[in-house]
Structure formats: structure tokens, C-alpha cells
Image (cartoon, rainbow, N blue to C red):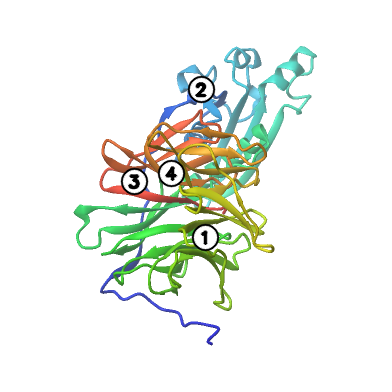
């Protein structure tokens, strides 16, 4: 038996490989609920210490990131008591305390030659700063209220990326949780007006900016899933008029066909160490869960039941899988220990539960719950079995969790069109990600990059 298969490049008769990038956002995040209950903060426009116009305003990126996180509600510009600050030294602390903001981001941009710029920022804890003033310690004598601050020399092309980096640092400093603003999302679009290659696999920054079309196909594309290093995507393609699983490198554009068995080849999921791929195959008759060792291509059949077993997902420690099965009569989520092969049913609440995946901390399961005929995104605490339904949208599917566990992106239907939406893990913050044309589905949130 051959241990290795040759790299297979796709036939151009069925599919086009390309990267076409747009700096503008095709997906726009439209917040629909929850931001008013978030924690108030402030982001002051960064002071420009050059001539002419600043290349771009980094503070806009930071403010938008924090608002979209669902955790923070940045003050409007007209509510800022000072709009020109380059450090905490010039802050009118009494005026800032009156805003009710918990913290303030201030910074500056200074040209340093050769089209490069020094960007500085500070995160000021207003509660600590006010306490220092009341204790007769001015900001210049006590710096405990500066809880984060960095500087870097970057080209103008990196302003947006460095803005996301600042947002990550601010988010972690204020919540204790790592920020996920430098991540990406992958998704499938279907545009009937795009000609013969109407199915497209796209990748964009988490906020929809810097979108690139990874490939276009005449036939459906499904189920993208990121490798743990964020370099590759596994996905399902029907370019040969039947389902096949591929892995594509986002940087080299090389891709490899992993399975082409008769019947179903679906639901690829990378293992946490990136060495294996869980998948759904029906090559032996029944629809079962398998795991492939990517180095040897050896397949391990994980389930063996007459009912449909599908949609595998790895536990964070890589020792078990959850999957959807109808072995109990209705679609529910089960867990299998890969060493002992012991299977445990996890979900009971509602009519159906399917498409389960673990949160990064391994303490909860995110899934699609059907109750009273409605399909919505839900979260279940594994310790108690309690399920919270997080969404009220229509025909929700394909939930994917941010790598910091704070948000869930998913497919839904809005005004008769498939689109993407997001919800915070507690269900309070909600947003839509509409696209001007076509349908959008099968989102996948990248790991930390």
C-alpha cells in the first residue's frame, strides 16, 4: 500500500486557483444588539507629528475593534473631553472621570524617514489615575495607571495591522483574555451573477477587510477548516461532480486532494496538533467518522453504527471527538474517547442538536439546536449539561468559535438570503455580516495568527 500520494493540482476545466485581494471590506459588520450594555472606554485620535495628512487614523481601527468585540462601547468623538492627546501627561483627569469611561487609549504617529513612522500608544486606567490624583500623586509621579503601552516603527501599509495589534493588547489588558483582532475568517460565497465560476472560497480579516478569493469553482465548495498554524485550509469540493476533500496552502497556492472515495467525503477537521484530519466517509456503506494520519494517509475508522454518524470535531486536548449521530433516533451530539472508543451522549435538550464543536477552554460545546422547529446557535456547559440558546435568527448553521472563545460566527438567513452573523458567547452582543451580492455560508474562524 502506498504511504504517500502525489500532489494533485486541480484541473482548470472545473476550477480556477487565484488570489485576488481587495483592501475594502466586502463583508461589513453591522451591530444589531448589545453594544449599549458593554463597558465604556475611550479611544482618542492619535496625535499626528508630521506635516500634511496622516496616512490613516489608527485610532479608528482600535475603536471599531473594541466595539465589535461586544465587550466595550467606545465613546463617540463628540463625547471626548479632549481630542488631541499624545500621552497621559496632558490628560484632564477630572474631565475624563466625568465621562464614565473605564480606560482611555492615547497615542501618536511620528514620521521617522524612508516612509516609516513611529507609532506609540498608552492605555490609561482612569480609575487608578483618579485614585492617584486623590492621593495627591499626579500622573507624572505615579505610572500605575498606565496598564499597557508600546511603540513600533512601521510603514504606512502596516497601520491597519498595527491597529489590530493595539486592540489585542488593550482587550487582553482589560479582560485578561487574549484578543482575536489579528485573526481571519474563511467562507464560501455563491453568486449567480459571477458567471460560470459562481462558487468561491474566500478569506478575509476578521472584520471583512483585505478579502481575497482563494479559488473559484463551477461546482459547490463546502466546509472550510483552518490548520492549527493558520497556513492551510481543508475543504470539500464537488469540482469532479462528487465530493472530495482537499487541503490548500494559502501562501504557496499548492493544494492536495486528500480523499476521493466513492460516496460521501465530507466534514474535514484538523486535529489540534495538525497531524491528522477527522472526516466523514461512506466508502464502506454507512456514513461514519474516520481519522486520517496526514503523513501516512492511514485511515482509522472511529465509529461503526448503522445510523448516520457525521460532523466530527476535536476536543482541545486531541484525545476525543464529538460528532452528530442519529443512533438515538434523532440527531444528537456524542463524544468518543479515541483510546477506549467509549461513546457518551452529550445532548438531550431540544429536538435536535448537531454540528457541535468545543470552545477553546474545553468547558463548553457550541452547536446548532433545534427546538420547536427553529434552528439556532446554542452553547452547552459540559459540567452541567445546561444549554443556552444564543440566537433568534432564522435557519442558523455552521457555528465557528473565535480562538479566544469570545465570539461565534455562523451562517444564517436574513431577508431570504444566506449570510453570516456573529454572537458573543453570552448571547448579549449580536451582529450581521451582510454581503452586497450572492449568498455567504460555511464560515470558519482562523486560529491566532
Q: Are marks 1 and 4 in contact (CB under 8 Å)?
A: no
Sooner in the amino-acid sequence: mark 2 or mark 4: 2
Between the residue at mark 3 and the residue at mark 2, the CA separation in whole angstroms equals: 26 Å
Residues at discs 1 and 3 in contact (Cβ within 8 Å): no
Sequence-wise first label, 1 or 3 = 3
Q: Nearer the viewer, residue 257 or 25?
A: 257
Q: Do the numbered discs 2 and 4 sit on residues whose CB atoms are within 8 Å?
A: no
Separation of marks 4 and 3 at Cα, in angstroms: 17 Å
Label 1 environment density (alpha carbons within 10 Å; few <14, some 14–19, many ≥20): many
Q: Which residue is mark 3?
A: 26
Q: CA distance from mark 1 to mark 4?
A: 17 Å
Which mark is nearer the camera, 1 or 2? 1
Residue 196 against residue 126 in the figure, above or below: below
- Few, some or many C-alpha atoms within 10 Å of disc 3 (few <14, some 14-19, many ≥20)? some
Q: Position of residue 193 (x, y in %)?
A: 19, 53
Where is residue 262 drawn, in percent x and y? Answer: 38, 74
Which labelled disc corresponds to residue 269?
Answer: 1
Q: Secondary structure at mark 2?
A: loop
Q: Which residue is mark 4?
A: 410
Earlier sequence position, callout 4 versus callout 3: 3
The secondary structure type at the circle numbered 3 is loop
Return the disc, 1 or 2, that comes first in the chain's sequence.
Answer: 2
Q: Is residue 42 left or right of residue 393?
A: right
Mark in the foreground, 3 or 2: 3
Q: CA distance from mark 1 to mark 2?
A: 41 Å
Q: Disc 1 vs disc 2: Cβ atoms closer than 8 Å?
A: no
Instruction: Say which mark, if any, is on residue 75.
Output: 2
Identify the element where label 1 is drawn.
Answer: strand
SS assignment at label 4: strand
Amino acid at each position: 500500500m502506498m504511504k504517500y500520494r502525489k500532489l494533485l493540482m486541480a484541473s482548470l476545466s472545473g476550477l480556477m486557483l487565484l488570489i485576488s485581494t481587495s483592501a475594502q471590506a466586502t463583508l461589513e459588520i453591522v451591530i444589531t444588539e448589545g453594544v449599549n450594555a458593554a463597558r465604556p472606554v475611550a479611544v482618542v485620535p492619535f496625535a499626528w507629528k508630521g506635516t500634511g495628512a496622516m496616512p490613516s487614523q489608527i485610532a479608528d481601527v482600535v475603536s471599531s475593534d473594541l466595539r465589535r468585540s461586544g465587550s466595550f462601547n467606545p465613546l463617540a468623538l463628540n463625547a471626548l473631553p479632549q481630542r488631541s492627546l499624545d500621552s497621559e501627561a496632558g490628560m484632564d483627569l477630572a474631565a475624563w472621570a466625568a465621562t464614565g469611561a473605564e480606560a482611555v487609549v492615547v497615542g501618536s504617529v511620528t514620521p521617522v524617514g524612508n516612509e516609516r513612522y513611529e507609532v506609540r500608544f498608552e492605555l490609561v486606567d482612569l480609575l487608578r489615575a483618579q485614585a492617584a490624583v486623590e492621593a495627591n500623586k499626579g500622573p507624572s509621579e505615579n505610572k500605575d495607571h498606565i496598564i499597557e503601552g508600546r511603540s513600533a516603527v512601521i510603514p504606512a501599509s502596516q497601520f491597519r495591522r498595527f491597529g489590530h495589534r493595539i486592540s489585542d493588547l488593550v482587550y487582553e489588558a482589560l479582560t485578561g483574555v487574549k484578543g482575536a483582532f489579528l485573526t481571519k475568517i474563511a467562507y464560501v460565497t455563491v453568486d449567480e451573477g459571477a458567471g460560470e465560476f459562481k462558487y468561491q472560497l474566500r478569506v478575509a480579516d476578521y472584520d471583512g477587510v483585505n478579502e481575497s478569493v482563494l479559488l473559484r469553482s463551477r461546482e459547490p465548495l463546502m466546509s472550510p477548516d483552518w490548520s492549527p498554524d493558520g497556513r492551510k485550509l481543508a475543504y470539500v469540493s464537488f469540482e469532479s461532480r462528487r465530493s472530495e476533500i482537499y487541503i490548500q496552502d494559502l501562501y504557496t497556492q499548492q493544494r492536495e486532494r486528500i480523499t476521493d472515495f466513492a460516496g460521501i467525503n465530507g466534514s474535514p477537521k484538523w486535529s489540534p496538533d495538525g497531524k491528522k484530519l477527522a472526516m466523514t466517509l461512506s466508502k464502506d456503506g454507512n456514513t461514519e467518522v474516520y481519522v486520517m494520519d496526514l503523513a501516512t494517509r492511514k485511515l482509522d475508522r472511529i465509529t461503526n453504527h448503522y445510523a448516520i454518524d457525521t460532523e466530527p470535531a476535536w476536543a482541545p486536548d486531541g484525545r476525543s471527538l464529538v460528532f452528530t449521530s442519529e443512533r438515538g433516533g434523532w440527531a444528537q451530539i456524542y463524544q468518543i474517547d479515541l483510546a477506549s472508543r467509549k461513546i457518551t451522549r452529550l445532548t438531550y435538550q431540544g429536538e435536535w442538536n448537531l454540528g457541535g464543536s468545543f470552545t477553546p477552554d474545553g468547558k463548553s460545546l457550541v452547536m446548532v439546536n433545534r427546538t420547536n422547529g427553529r434552528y439556532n446557535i446554542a452553547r452547552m456547559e459540559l459540567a452541567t449539561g445546561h444549554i443556552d440558546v444564543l440566537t433568534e435568527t432564522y435557519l442558523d448553521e455552521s457555528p465557528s468559535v473565535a480562538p479566544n472563545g469570545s465570539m461565534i460566527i455562523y451562517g444564517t438567513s436574513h431577508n431570504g438570503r444566506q449570510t453570516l452573523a456573529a454572537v458573543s458567547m453570552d448571547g448579549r452582543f449580536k451582529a450581521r455580516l451582510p454581503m452586497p451580492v450572492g449568498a455567504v455560508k460555511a464560515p470558519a474562524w482562523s486560529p491566532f495568527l
